[in-house]
Amino acid sequence: MEADVTISLNKGVADPEGSNVKKALNLLGFEEVMNVRTMKTFRIDLATNDRVKAKKDVEEMCKKLLANPVIQSYQIELR
């Protein structure tokens, strides 16, 4: 089973990389771009077919390593 984990910054947290990309796109003539937010995605291969266990394990991975709960949120998609 695979798990896709997408980590993103919480609302209100500055995203300097996203801001710089937005500015660059505007300078390149893409004036319709109003905002850019960055995200990180991890694809994790798991040696289980048990969806409940997989979800629980990936939640723990997020809490212990992948995401900083103070400034980030995460979404998990099992595939």
Image: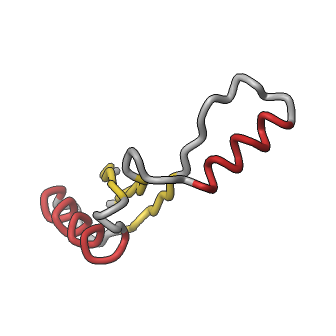
Residue at image coords 50%, 53% = 14
Residue at the left extreme of this rendering: 52
Position of residue 68 relative to residue 33, above or below, is below
Q: Which residue is drawn at 36% across and 58% down?
A: 72
Which of the pair 71/51 is nearer the observer? 71
Question: Is residue 26 placed above or below 79 in the rendered structure?
Answer: above
**Residue 33's spot in the image, x, y percent?**
68, 29
Residue at the outermost bottom position: 64
Q: Dividing the picture into quarters, in which one does residue 48 lie?
A: bottom left
Figure quadrant of the N terminus = bottom left
Q: Which residue lies furthest to the right in this view?
A: 28
Q: Which residue is drawn at 50% across and 58% down?
A: 40
The answer to which of 44 and 40 lies nearer the viewer is 40
Residue 65 spot, x, y in % from top left: 33, 76
**Residue 29 left/right relative to 13:** right
- 33 left or right of 61? right
Where 3 falls versus 29 (above or below)? below
x%, y% of residue 51?
Answer: 18, 56
Snapshot colouring:
secondary structure
User: Which residue appears at 43% of the width and 53% of the height?
Assistant: 13
Q: Where is residue 75 in the image (x, y as percent from the top left)?
A: 32, 50
Q: How many marks?
A: 0
Give the left or right position of residue 32, taking residue 60 as reference: right
